[in-house]
Image (cartoon, rainbow, N blue to C red):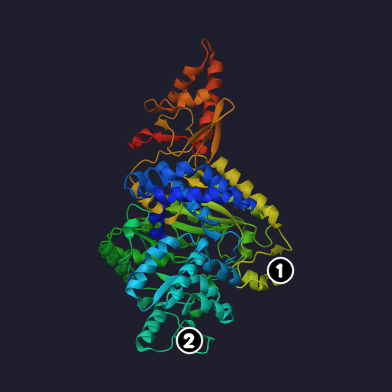
Amino acid sequence: MTQRDLDVEAVHELLQPAELEQAVKRADTRRSKPTSPAERLRLDEVLLCAERTVALAPGALDVLRDPKAFYDPMQLVEAREAVSHGLRLLSAGAGVVWDIAPVSYGIEGVDSAQLTDLDRATADAGLNVFEQLWSSGVLADLARDRPDVVGVSILNHQQILPGLTLARRCKAAGHRVVLGGTVYAKFADAIMARPRFLELFCDVLVPYEGETALLAVLERVAAGRELSGAPNTIALNASGSPVAGPVRAEDVAALPTPDFTGLPLHLYLTPVPVLPILTGKGCYFNKCRFCDIPFINEVAPLPYRTRPPATVADDIATLAERHGARHFEITDEALPPRFLLRLGDELARRDLDVSLVGYARLERGFDADTCTRLAAMGVRKLFFGLESGSQRTLDHMAKGIRVAEASRVLRAVHDAGIAVHLFSMVGFPEETEADARETLNFLLDHADVLAEPQHSFDVHGFSLDLRTEYFDDAERFGIEIDHAELARTDFPVSVAAWWPSRGLPPDRADELRAEFQATLRSRFPVHRQFPAHLWPSFEEYSILYADHYAQRPFSWRLCLPSPGDPLAFVLRWPRSVAFHPVDGGYVAQSFTGSVPLPAAMLQLLSRPGPAASVDDMLDAVAARIAPAGTAEAGAAALVAGLRRLIDQLLAAGVLWLVPADTGVEVAT
């Protein structure tokens, strides 16, 4: 068996100077033709940064895998932005949106929920960013090796278009294609009614758990039997009709240790491996009205199935030995604290020194003693769904947590030395503006904890998903749905056309979310300027930073420290910054923002001096530009103006404040 991760392969093979230079030409050509306003804006944006993107994107992949540069957050942010702009540039010439910040893959004018659009888009080689790469690479390899089956896994909506394009190409080349992944667990009935999907994209679809299904398909291939009828599958029978095999829930405890052999772990964008590990499937709470996990897990008799802690510990030990990994992301929906404690005991018995990150609920089981033990076993960060700071809203969604309990858990986890992430949303059904403001207030009330660099939080808009209690009983919860519009969609995940009959109108919810983001930016300026976080907030990178900075100071910041702070810094222009002449001055522009800059200030700030406290640094700059005989009050005003300007530059990412205690050399 051969395993390929075509996503990471494509990033490395396409983010090369020659490919990027060709992409500039394609994007420029496309901009010269009539396009939609949205696409025109995207083309303008990628071409504005094209020269810097071509120069920096290839080397950015090395920064993200470098064991020293990776832990310089300024270089990390710049490298991720360079990769992001590189992907935008590569895809812009084809009318495709491909990005990692946020993760996205879409095609202009194509709805991945419509079968007719999927048919049209996957047949058009001009809409496939990977066409040449696949033709000369994976498809040529498959033609040589002729495997019994080709499996394509589609795990999220961003993978639908490229995944189905690949599946269609493989099927057209005569391969037996087995298509699986969690996306199509939601669409078994829809696909049974649309045999065209199977005709186009696969010989077998696995909408449910795939271990038994794949083995059964391989046995049928070996025996020359018809493929339809295997457990957990949908396939066309000899007469061309869709047939669903019996549904079977896997015995999670009996599953083998995950096998990543053959995957190019050295190409993943981390300096050391961070591997996923499964402890269970489903959710032990399983009641939240906005969540579709209960639907996905309906195939099983139990809402939550777990592997024995000893088995999970054996899995971790095997993967640590096999791949040299000691960092693991537990991929469960929610981790019970008691299970984690039992896992910690098993890890201790095997003398395993590992670091773990995972998802959990803000429940009373995370008391001070438990959190201390979790930190000792290697838990470095926990991601919690706060959802709302309003008890009324939490009760409405049947979240099963108390605001006061959430506060206590947050502080207990923090006191134990474990980082946290808090997910929150605005725009829940029947939520009032006062309810929404309680969410903002919860974050502000815990600023003494959340201001620490290792913690993170966000505020998203609410999305109404199908297959949830909110959808199934919409009228009861003050939700109106355009069912006629929904019926015209083949594979809907969420409801685009809905509105609340009670509570916040959608446009007001959007306004509040924007207001809250601005408030949070101003309240937490030191380590985060949304969407930029100096300490990376997502799972794989946050666990690596937690380990690296466990015994080191984290002096990096996105604004100048307060007057009197003795820490020494150096100001540096990042490589991604460009200076555009404007009206006798300049606009300093990075990948993330731009700031007007007087010519004299550009000249002064471009003379890097020795590391010094910010007070000394500002006094030295002010002394260079202050007229002779400037009074003390005038000098103070000048320093205050310099501070405001430099803070603007730092927040926009066009200037770096490098701590002297890191020993990091910054390219200029």
**Chain-order first, disc 1 or disc 2:** 2
Q: Is residue 244 left or right of residue 323?
A: right
- Amino acid type at circle 2 is Pro
**Which residue is labeled 1 in the image?**
482
Marks counted in the figure total 2
- Amino acid type at circle 1 is Asp
Q: In the figure, 610 relative to 576: above or below?
A: above
Residue 528: percent from the left, percent from the top?
A: 50, 44
**Which residue is labeled 2 in the image?**
246
Residue 302: percent from the left, percent from the top?
A: 48, 78
What residue is rendered at 35% in x and 89% in y? 223
Quadrant location, the N terminus = bottom left
Which residue, as the protein is rendered here, is positioned at the far top? 629
Q: CA distance from mark 1 to mark 2?
A: 34 Å
Q: In the figure, 588 relative to 337: above or below?
A: above
Decide: few, some or many residues near mark 2? Use Cα within 10 Å; few <14, some 14-19, many ≥20.
few
Residue 429: percent from the left, percent from the top?
A: 67, 62
Q: Tell me the element at label 1.
A: loop
Q: Is residue 644 visible?
A: no
Along the line of sight, the residue nearer the viewer: 622 or 603? 603
Decide: few, some or many residues near mark 1? Use Cα within 10 Å; few <14, some 14-19, many ≥20.
few
Q: Is residue 131 visible?
A: yes
What residue is rendered at 63% in x and 48% in y? 514
Along the line of sight, the residue nearer the viewer: 40 or 487? 40
Along the line of sight, the residue nearer the viewer: 16 or 316? 16
Residue 562: percent from the left, percent from the top?
A: 49, 31
Which quadrant of the figure has residue 504?
A: bottom right
Quadrant location, the C terminus = top left
Q: Is residue 67 left or right of residue 622?
A: left
